[in-house]
């Protein structure tokens, strides 16, 4: 006999979407059960955002030490820096443990029932969980699907042995001598940069003719230049044909059909992620799809009544903060509140070196949307704080309507610009105009002054350029 329980809200998946929904539902007094097959925190905390940013920081510090060991204009000297990768990984794992432990404590505090095990959907109101101590059947009024995504495989080069995904790349036992990265998107460039800074020879193969093809070329140019200076080889516009017979090189083909072999001790496959919709009974519900993802409306409802979907399983943009915001909203809707998911912008950050941050529309997107816009750039080369941080590469760009100066987009590229995401998001959410940002006193000396100066420049009133 299986154990049968019931709840109001049943959430499958304890990633940023699912655990945030569970906490908020618990806070609002909704009986809630969260089922997680692996570890609370999901991809983001365990094998995604947090561990990748930890390794990016470690690699950056190691690179800095190596620069000091050569010739530092700052007058710092360091002798023969070395890195103990096992210790670096243990440090990263410690951060992951602290955060995932924190999530479990927060769930408990909110009265969430956490069930550890893999869920199988039986129907829109019933799920069976394999807990390892016998099956548990859970019945619910509302079913929230938050099962996330998984790395996209490449049929010509399956995962296994030396072909790894970001998950394995985040826990290296050692650094390979030669790493070939397939995909010059978020993961390929963030982790490719880490491995290069840790000493690997890195070649990045990309099908499109430029890196980070979803961003505009002006924004990615400083990143492409930095990759080149770092010694990362870029093979753009190439098709991956698979490993060679000896298994020690990746065969790639250019547009003319000419084939070359890129020697590789390890291959990081990072060609995107796909929603996790197979293998756990979801097919039984026959929910409407949008490509590989579940189709949802502006309240995250699927095509079945009281079945909701949030986060990566509901498609792009596959970002943790979008999943969290959707999770919060669904919990509030289930609790009876009136909500709609209509953010003015979902900021995105690519943690390359330099970093890229975007919120709202780029100039080309504004044009495509039929808006008559003006845009202005303020370069970090004219920002005092950037000089003191030795990071004058990059700029802040603002896009605003020509008629009423309403800001519709912000972009920046440069070291540390990820922290500008908050200012960008707030300005768009609060419908700021160029005059609002230009007229706000920004602390000196900060990188944020470039935000104010970009707005001033769009008004033809820049002071420091
Ligand atoms: P997930 O976090 O994937 O969580 C889903 C959970 O569901 C998992 O824990 C899984 O075990 C569980 N699950 C699945 N099926 C079942 C089942 N049948 N039964 C029980 N449990 C199940 N995003 C950012 O915003 N910023 C970043 O810097 C960033 N960096 C990233 C770096 C890497 C290397 C990767 C891979 C991703 C990164 N992302 C980043 C993306 C981010 O991790 C995802 O967008 C986010 O985790 C999606 O949250 P989610 O709740 O939808 O799903
Ligand atoms: P991505 O979509 O960012 O990049 C994939 C790249 O691979 C693209 O440039 C694409 O043109 C290229 N590509 C696709 N097929 C190819 C092929 N056969 N050969 C060569 N190149 C090919 O995907 P990703 O880097 O795997 O990351 C997955 C998702 O995870 C991202 O879309 C993002 O949502 C999330 N993520 C976010 C962050 C962040 O927010 N900082 C970091 C990492 C991951």
Image (cartoon, rainbow, N blue to C red):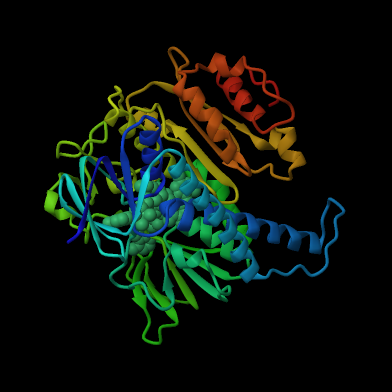
Give 158 or 128, whichever is nearer the viewer. Answer: 128
Residue 288: which quarter of the image? top left
Give 113 or 251, whichever is nearer the viewer. Answer: 113
Residue located 30% across and 61% down the image: 131
Q: Is residue 149 visible?
A: no
Residue 244: which quarter of the image? bottom left
Where is residue 100 shown, x and y percent of the image?
A: 49, 52
Position of 33 compared to 381: left or right?
left
Q: Is residue 388 visible?
A: yes
Residue 369 vertical placement versus 63 (above, below): above
Give 206 or 46, whichever is nearer the viewer. Answer: 46
Residue 304 vertical placement versus 254 (above, below): above
Residue 123 vertical placement versus 395 (above, below): below
Residue 379 vertical placement versus 415 (above, below): above
Where is residue 157 shown, x and y percent of the image?
A: 33, 73
* Ligand 2 located in image quadrant: bottom left
Q: Where's the C terminus, which quadrant? A: top right
Position of 332 compared to 382: left or right?
left
Position of 313 compared to 40: left or right?
left
Residue located 55% across and 28% down the image: 423
Residue located 57% across and 47% down the image: 222
Where is residue 426 shown, x and y percent of the image?
A: 50, 25
The residue most toward the right is 75
């Amino acid at each position: 006999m299986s154990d049968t329980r019931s709840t109001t809200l049943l959430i499958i998946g304890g990633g940023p979407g699912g655990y945030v929904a569970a906490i908020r539902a618990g806070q609002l007094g909704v009986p809630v059960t969260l089922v997680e097959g692996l570890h609370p925190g999901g991809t983001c905390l365990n094998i995604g955002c947090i561990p990748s940013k930890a390794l990016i920081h470690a690699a950056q510090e190691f690179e800095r030490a190596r620069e000091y060991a050569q010739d530092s204009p700052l007058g710092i000297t360091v002798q023969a820096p070395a890195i103990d990768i096992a210790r670096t990984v243990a440090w990263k794992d410690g951060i992951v443990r602290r955060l995932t432990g924190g999530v479990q404590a927060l769930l408990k505090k909110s009265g969430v029932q956490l069930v550890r095990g893999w869920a199988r959907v039986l129907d829109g109101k019933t799920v069976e969980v394999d807990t390892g101590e016998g099956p548990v059947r859970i019945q619910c009024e509302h079913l929230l699907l938050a099962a996330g995504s998984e790395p996209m495989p490449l049929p010509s080069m399956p995962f296994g042995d030396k072909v790894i995904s970001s998950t394995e790349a985040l826990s290296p036992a050692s650094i390979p001598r030669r790493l070939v990265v397939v995909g010059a998107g978020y993961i390929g460039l963030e982790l490719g940069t880490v491995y290069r800074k840790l000493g690997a020879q890195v070649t990045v193969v990309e099908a499109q003719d430029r890196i980070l093809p979803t961003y505009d070329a002006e924004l990615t140019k400083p990143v492409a230049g930095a990759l080149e200076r770092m010694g990362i080889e870029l093979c753009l516009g190439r098709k991956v044909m698979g490993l060679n017979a000896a298994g020690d090189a990746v065969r790639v083909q250019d547009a003319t059909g000419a084939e070359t072999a890129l020697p590789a001790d390890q291959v990081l496959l990072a060609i995107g992620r796909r929603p996790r919709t197979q293998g756990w009974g979801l097919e039984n519900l026959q929910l409407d799809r949008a490509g590989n993802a579940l189709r949802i409306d502006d309240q995250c409802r699927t095509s079945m009544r009281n079945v909701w979907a949030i986060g990566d399983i509901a498609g792009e943009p596959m970002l943790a903060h979008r999943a969290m915001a959707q999770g919060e909203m669904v919990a509030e809707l289930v609790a009876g509140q009136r909500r709609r998911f209509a953010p003015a912008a979902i900021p995105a950050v690519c943690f390359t070196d330099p970093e890229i941050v975007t919120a709202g529309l780029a100039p080309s997107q504004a044009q495509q949307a039929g808006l008559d816009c003006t845009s202005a750039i303020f370069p970090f080369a004219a920002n005092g704080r950037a000089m003191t941080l030795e990071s004058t590469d990059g700029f802040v760009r603002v896009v605003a309507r020509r008629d009423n100066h309403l800001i519709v987009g912000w972009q920046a590229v440069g070291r540390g610009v990820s922290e500008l995401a908050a200012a960008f998001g707030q300005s768009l959410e609060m419908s700021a105009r160029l005059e609002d940002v230009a007229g706000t006193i920004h602390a000196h000396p900060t990188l944020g002054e470039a935000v104010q100066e970009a707005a001033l420049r769009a008004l033809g009133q820049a002071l420091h350029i």
